[in-house]
Structure formats: structure tokens, C-alpha cells
Image (tube, grey):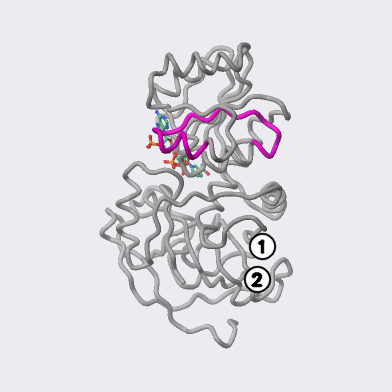
Amino acid sequence: MTAGDVPERMQAAAFDEFGGPEVITLRTLPVPQIADDEILLKVWSAGVGVWDAGAREGKLVPEGAAFPMVPGAEAAGTVAAVGRRVTNVAEGDLVYVYGYTRPKGGFYAEYAATKAEYVAKLPAGVPAEHAGAMPTDALTALSGLDALGLSAGAWVLIFGASGGQGHLAVQLAKRQGLNVIAVASGAEGVTLVTRLGADLSLDGHGDLTEVLARIREVTPDGVDGVLAMAGGATLDRLAEALRDGGLLAYPNGVQPAPRERPGVTVQAYDGETGPERLQRLNELIEAGPFQVHVAETFPLGRAAEAHRRLQTSFPGRLLLAVR
Ligand SMILES: NC(=O)c1ccc[n+]([C@@H]2O[C@H](COP(=O)([O-])OP(=O)(O)OC[C@H]3O[C@@H](n4cnc5c(N)ncnc54)[C@H](OP(=O)(O)O)[C@@H]3O)[C@@H](O)[C@H]2O)c1
């Protein structure tokens, strides 16, 4: 089922029990076999996200996953083999994938089997070396912008704008013609979101009275929507900037989950994939240079260390370089 030059065994980072970062170790596993509707990906790079820590802890285990469990929901790489019914990509294509389900293992591996419908060609403008850290957060950011449903010219406030999903949401929102107020983490985060095109960049760890005053200067009637990548007291304050009838959207996983409040509709969303969404994402990305900010890259053998780093503060994303 796999191409002639694909080995039978591969290196993968995996765990045999749920627990802390130390349960992830490098080992040799069989290269997964593909079904007719799947492709075999030769992984170049894989994103490391909080959802992977959820899988490792046994709190967010993908359907059908079994020990030894290979984490990793997203990757970029080349197509090493295609199943008989696959038509959207061909052997040798440079692609990216957000594997919504992954019963044959995740992407912390040299090879991974995934449904072809989750795979898209890498759009021009995304640096290939960082692409593995893009799929989940870019698709989820797109879901968030869809949930807000704002028209060009509207003002969106993105809280957590220098984080994984946030810094991609800033770029996608600008491409949809929105005005973006980016509330980022510290001076480094503010610099990042300014470079990515935010119309107003503010430090969410700064003086919130001043932050709200700056927001009111540019939006005296209030912002039209808030995308919240983090919750808690700061979000509660920032939500004061919403206009009456405004919408606050947040990805499931944000803790504490944002509360309903008078005059504001609160809506949760999830990252969704599929051919139509991947095509729409690619069209938006191809509108100009698109940055996937990688704070730190780890080799596959240091996946446990990457999971420890997840527990700290950093702008953008963490990445495993596999090839
Ligand atoms: N449901 C889904 O399909 C789905 C998919 C992907 C992600 N998610 C969820 O979406 C959320 C965001 O994901 P992510 O990958 O973007 O996580 P992330 O990179 O950790 O983003 C959260 C950001 O919020 C920032 N932040 C927190 N408090 C702040 C403050 N007071 N001022 C400024 N910035 C602040 C954090 O920076 P500091 O830590 O430096 O303050 C961080 O940059 C997570 O809860 C994740 O679980 C859900």
C-alpha cells in the first residue's frame, strides 16, 4: 500500500501511559498502512499545542487512539503515498494537515496516515519550515472569525493576539478587511502583532484602564466583536469595550469559559476542517505573505522538553522539526 521507498519502521515520539511530559519518549514504530481514502505523510514538521498536552494527560484523547499513542494534531510535509480513492493531492506534493481524528497515530513521527480530506497543498506565502505549526490554529482562527461574522470595516478585538491562534487570527482578520485591535502579551507580543498588521496593539498585562481608554479613542461606539484566546479577569474588563449587541467568541478550551453578560452574545467555537474550509484558508493566506511565528523548535527526540516549554509563556507556537 505504501510507495517503494517508504521504510517499514520509523522514529516517533509516543507514550504508553497518561502523565507528565516525561511519559513521551522516542521509539521505533511501524510506519502506518493507509486505507483507500488516506495519504501517508512524510512529516517535515509538527506543531506542539496545548491540545497535545491534553492528550498526554488523558483529558483530550482523540477518538480511536491507542497505546503506544503518538501525539500531534497537525503537520506539514510531503505526500509519500496515496490511497486509491485520493484525488486532491498526489505523491510528492508539499502539504499541511490538521488531523481531526487520527486513529493510526498523530504527527510526532517520521510518517503519519491521515484522511486525504484533512490535507491541503501548502499555499504560497507560508514558509515551509514553519508550516507544521499553522494548521490547527489557522483553521480554528478562521472558525472564530466565522462565528463573529463581521463585515469588512468592522472592529474586532483579539485578546491573546500574540499567542498561537491569536497571531494567525490577526492576519486572517486583516485579510477579511476588519480593523484589528490586538491585545498581546508584553512588549514582545505587542511588537509581533504590530508587525503582523494590527491597527492598534496593546499590552494586556499593562494598565487595563489605560488599555480600555486607548480602545475607546479608536472605537467610541465600542468594538463590534471580541475573539478571546484567554479568559479570566482581563477578558472581563476588555469585554467592556464591546458595543451593545456585540458578539464575544472563544474557542472551547479557554479557561475560565467566558460568561454571558447583558447586551453581549457569547459563543464558543471549535476548529473545523474539510475541503471547503482548507480552500478558503488557502485563498486568504495567499493574499500576501503570511507569518507563522515559531518561538522555539525542537527535534523529535526532545518532544518531552517541548511539552515542558508549553507550560511557559511564549509568543506564537512551538514546533517539532522532524525531517
Ligand atoms: N476548540 C478548538 O478547536 C481549539 C483549537 C485550538 C485551540 N483551542 C484553545 O484556544 C485557546 C488559545 O489557543 P492558543 O494555541 O492560541 O493558546 P496560547 O498560544 O496559549 O494563546 C493564549 C494567549 O493568551 C495570552 N494571554 C493570556 N493572558 C493575557 C493577558 N492578560 N494579556 C495579553 N495576553 C494574554 C497568552 O500569553 P501569556 O501566557 O504570555 O500571557 C497567550 O499568548 C486555548 O485555550 C486552546 O485550548 C481550542
Residue 206 magenta-drawn? no
Residue 114 is situated, as x and y percent measured from the top left of the image, at 57, 65
Quadrant of ligand 1: it is top left
Magenta segment: does it hold 183? Answer: yes
Q: Residue furthest bottom?
A: 4
Q: Residues within 10 Å of mark 2 (few under 14, many from 20)?
A: some
Going by the numbered disc 2, the residue's amino acid type is Asp
Reading the image, the residue beneath label 1 is: 121
Q: Is mark 1 within 8 Å of ligand 1?
A: no
Quadrant for the N terminus in the image = bottom right
Left or right: residue 275 versus residue 191 is right
Which quadrant would residue 222 be assigned to in this image? Answer: top right
Few, some or many residues within 10 Å of mark 1 (<14, 14–19, 20+): many
Label 2 sits on residue: 93
User: Which three-letter amino acid code belongs to the residue tagged 1?
Assistant: Lys
1 or 2: tag closer to the N-terminus: 2
In the image, the segment drawn in magenta is 174-193
